[in-house]
């Protein structure tokens, strides 16, 4: 079988595959609290805290930082350093 025919066949098979139980799309908005904005006003940082009940039946949560970095590479890099300065400082000063 020629190589291009095999690719076409695999493409048709993957396009025709239906998934009955697709995973729901997670909306982080209700769990997101914006906590800082860069000095240029383009980028921002948030805390995302998603509560759940763990396998022991106790209340628990997943906590993480979220960054929306906007601009060219230099602007994004500066904003990341500016928004995460305290976290970077704490990481470097672990005793």
Image (tube, helix red, strand yellow):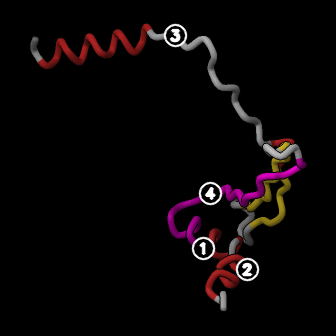
Q: CA distance from mark 4 to mark 2?
A: 20 Å
Q: Residues within 10 Å of mark 1 (few under 14, many from 20)?
A: some
Q: Give the spatial CA distance, label 4 vs label 3.
A: 36 Å
Which of the two labelled residues, at mark 2 and mark 1, occupies the earlier sequence position?
1
Residue at 74%, 72% in the rendered image: 39
Q: Which tag is nearer the camera, tag 1 or tag 3?
A: 3
Q: In this rendered view, identify the residue nearer to me: 11 or 69.
A: 11
Q: From which residue to which does the magenta span run? A: 58-78
Q: Which residue is mark 1?
A: 78
Check if mark 4's residue and mark 1's residue have beta carbons within 8 Å.
no
- Camera-side residue of 63 and 67: 63
Between the C-alphas of marks 4 and 1, the distance is 10 Å
> Residue at image x 62%, y 86%?
92
Place of residue 78 in the rendered image (x, y in percent of width and height, measured from the top left): 60, 73
Say what secondary structure mark 3 lies in.
loop
User: Is 11 colored magenta in this rendering?
Assistant: no
Quadrant of the rendered image containing residue 40:
bottom right
Label 2 CA crowd tier, 10 Å (few <14, some 14–19, many 20+): few
Numbered disc 2: secondary structure: helix
The residue indicated by pointer 4 is 70
Mark 4 or 2, closer to the camera: 2
- The residue under label 2 is 86
Residue 18: give its label: 3
The first of marks 4 and 1 along the sequence is: 4
Q: CA distance from mark 2 to mark 1?
A: 14 Å
Q: Secondary structure at mark 1?
A: helix
71 and 66: which is toward the camera: 66
Q: Disc 1 versus disc 3: distance between alpha carbons?
A: 44 Å
Q: Could you say which disc has been placed on residue 93 in the image?
A: none
- 2 or 3: tag closer to the N-terminus: 3
Residue 77 relative to residue 79: left or right: left
């Amino acid at each position: 079988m020629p190589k291009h025919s095999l690719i076409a066949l695999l493409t048709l098979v993957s396009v025709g595959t239906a998934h009955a139980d697709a995973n729901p799309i997670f909306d982080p908005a209700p769990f997101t609290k914006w906590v800082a904005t860069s000095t240029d006003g383009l980028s921002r940082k948030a805390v995302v805290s998603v509560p759940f009940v763990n396998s022991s039946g106790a209340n628990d949560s997943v906590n993480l930082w979220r960054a929306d970095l906007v601009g060219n590479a230099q602007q994004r890099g500066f904003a990341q350093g500016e928004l995460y300065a305290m976290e970077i400082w704490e990481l470097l000063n672990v005793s």
